[in-house]
Image: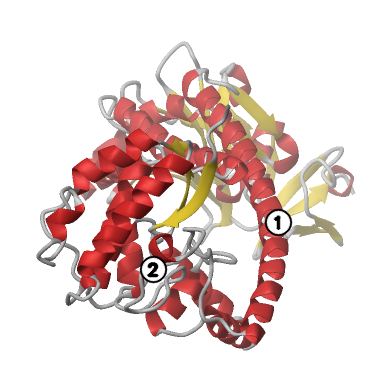
Amino acid sequence: MMEKTIKINLGGILFQIEEDAYKILKKYLVEIDARLRHTQGGAETLEDIESRISEIFNSKGGQAGVISKENVEEVISIIGSPETFETGGDFRDPGASAAYQPSKKKMFRNPDDRIIGGVCSGLGAFLGMEPVWVRLLFIIFACFFGVGFFVYVALWIALPEARTDLQKKEMYGDGPRPGRQGEGGTSGISQSAGGNYPVGAGTMSNVGNAFNEVFRAIGKVLFVVVRVFLILMGIVFVLGGFFALVTVFMVFFFKYPDYFSTHSFGINLFYFPDFLNYIVNPAAAPWIIALSFIIITLPLLALIYWGVKMIFWFRARDGIVAIGALVLWVGSLAALTMIAFNEGISYSETAKVFSSDVIPHTPPDLYVVSGQKVSDLKYDKEISLPEDEYDIYFTNDNRNLYIGTRLNVYPSDDKSAKIDVVKRSMGRSRIDASKKAELLTYNYRVSGDTIRIDEYFTVPSGSKWSADNVKVNISIPEGTRVHFDKTAENMFLEHHHSSEGWTGDGETVTEYGKSFQGSHYWVMTEGGLEVQKTAEKNN
């Protein structure tokens, strides 16, 4: 035969207790109340005793099960017999260092009377007014540019929730609490016929109750809407973070994609850690990769974790882990910043070195042809930055870098043709940068009416990339006809096919391979090179 059970509200928490255990507990509290009723602070002491009993029951899983006779007897042995309170002295909590003393109120969120987050109920307790009027004020202010909404959200984030009975005492202060008879009143378990606190009871007016019911209905709808929104956002966070994390692992550990080209956008992508060995100290490269991996993956893991929490709506004691992850992320970012700063010093100064050749008697027809070509390199990877007109080529068989050369052709100030090669590098100082520029390997040759130039220059093996650049500037007297081979002309045009175009015989040239079809040559004019068709030369 099942023992009859009774539901009671003790210290603001509902418990289910066996009938025999309830009788013992009620008798115990009635006897204590009789001894403390006429003493100063007796009502507060009785509340403290009930709160302590509630905490003991709760610690033993009372909310999940049924309070038995043995549980009550154990509590009485902890608190002490009614005779202990014969003198009417202050109750001393055996589990605390001192008795609870009523103090000034503190602001909390009230979980026992909440519609969304318990902010309005907590403010009502703090201000000593019914929560319904606080809710109305928030709704009114929400109509003014959403001020009430943002204030509510800010308080929801800032205010802690009153979970323990001590926090609830601090929230209400010395005033009456829901479920109590009022200040100076006694507990429902010792006075009411059924022995239960009237859950949610208070002095709320009928109008306030009506408003509260409306608010609760709206709150339930909002809760469902917000819950669905959070679930959808959580799914987005989890999927987005997961795929981003997989991509990071593929790039950092599996070197995939090893090479990916999107020529339609004019840019080639490559495996960055490979290039990293060329631009930083080899000893620093592994640290940069490891720190970059931590800086990228930790936020992604946090995103996935937040998404899971939003989907399943659970609480976890993750404060220590979160703080540890934040410290690790900040430390990694600081370390990477220091390494990057130290490596960045290598690019603090820029220097140029020059070499030139003069053709004293410039022939009427000058031929500019290519020497070593990029197509002969059989390179494996490429970085192409069209906006900067900069191309870098890699080969797997050695550690050299090959970089495309720029070609410019200008009008000469005299009757001589001149070729200038400008090498530029960056370093810790101008002297360091000059030394690096001098080590760049670039070949050209002048022979009669022919200038032979390489399509690329080489960074010496074992040297770091230092934003190196080589320009070939050819100055030609006006009237000189210039004949390019395909590679040399491409070197010239790829740096000059912008929106300004090139004009010749009424024809505007805007893109190589589109307008330059068939035989043609160039003529140096006062304004620069102009294209001419071969047929016009024969007239």
In the image, what residue occupies the spot 59% across and 16% down? Answer: 378
Task: Return the mark for residue 370.
Answer: none
- Name above or below for residue 11 compared with residue 473: below
Q: Name the outermost residue toward the top.
A: 397
On the image, the x and y values in percent for residue 331 come to: 26, 42
Q: Position of residue 199 (x, y in %)?
A: 53, 63
Query: Residue 498: which quarter of the image?
Result: bottom right
Colour mode? Answer: secondary structure
Residue 4 percent across, percent down from the top left: 54, 39
What is the three-letter code of the residue carrying label 1? Answer: Val
Q: Nearer the viewer, residue 272 or 305?
A: 305
Label 2 and label 1: CA atoms lie apart by 24 Å
Q: Secondary structure at mark 2?
A: loop
**Residue depth check, mark 2 versus mark 1: number of the one nearer the observer:** 2
Name which residue lies at 47% across and 58% down. Answer: 195
Mark 2 packing: few (<14 Cα in 10 Å), some, or many (20+)? many
User: Considering only vertical position in the picture, is 236 above or below 41?
Assistant: above
Q: Is residue 265 left or right of residue 331?
A: right
Name which residue type carries label 2: Phe
Which of the two labelled residues, at mark 2 and mark 1, occupies the earlier sequence position?
Answer: 2
Mark number, residue 108: 2
Residue 108 seen by the camera: yes
Q: Residues within 10 Å of mark 1 (few under 14, many from 20)?
A: few
Q: In terms of depth relative to the viewer, which is nearer, 23 or 412? A: 23
Which residue in the protein does label 1 denote?
A: 224
Vertical order, 131 against 46 (above or below) = below
Q: Which quadrant would residue 92 be assigned to in this image?
A: bottom left
